[in-house]
Image (spheres, helix red, strand yellow):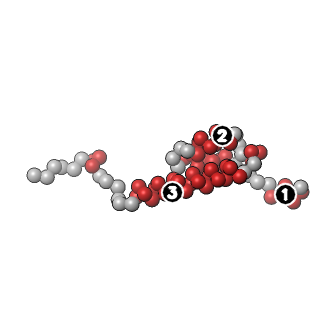
Amino acid sequence: MKQPRLGNDRKPPPGLLGFLTGVQLTLAAVAWTDLAIRPAIEIRGTKRAWALIIAINFVGPIAYLTYGRRPIDPGAAARA
């Protein structure tokens, strides 16, 4: 006789875990690369703190890319 399915017995679709892992690693790589090449003056907070925050799944890289970088003034390069 077949056992009734419980709510926690569901499995994710095949490939979903691999896709989400790829997205997470890509976001982290982009954020860490940007953090490494961007001058400290253009970052809100310290580079060390952001490097640790980026390691947090999905939230860290998105937070850095959204809030961690100061807006670049395009006129500043022209004035220099």
* Quadrant location of the C terminus in the rendered image: bottom right
User: How would you rate the neighbour count of disc 3 (Cα within 10 Å): few for under 14, some for 14-19, many for 20 or more?
Assistant: few
Q: Earlier in the sequence, mark 2 or mark 3?
A: 3
Residue on which disc 3 sits? 23
Distance Cα–Cα, label 2 vs label 3: 23 Å
Q: Which comes sooner in the sequence, label 1 or label 3? A: 3
Looking at the rendered structure, the secondary structure element under dot 1 is helix
**Of the image marks 2 and 1, the number of the one nearer the N terminus:** 2
User: What residue do we see at 29% from left, 46% from top?
Assistant: 8
| Pointer 1 with pointer 3, Cβ within 8 A | no
> Neighbour class for label 1 at 10 Å: few (<14), some, many (≥20)?
few
40 on left or right of 17: right
Residue at screen point 54% across, 47% down = 59
- The span from disc 2 to disc 1 (Cα, nearest Å) is 27 Å
Disc 1 residue type (three-letter): Ala
Residue 21 in the figure: left or right of residue 61: left
Residue 48's tag is: 2
Q: Which amino acid does label 2 sit on?
A: Arg
Residue at disc 3, secondary structure? helix
List x then y, in percent, for residue 10: 29, 52
How far across and down, in percent of the image, does residue 13 sit?
A: 35, 59
- The residue lying at 41 percent from left, 55 percent from top is 17
Kind of residue at disc 3: Val
Check the image and name the residue furthest to the right: 79
Secondary element under disc 2, as helix, strand or loop, is: helix
Report the residue marked by disc 1.
77
Q: In 3D space, how far apart are the residues under numbered discs 1 and 3 (Cα atoms)?
A: 33 Å
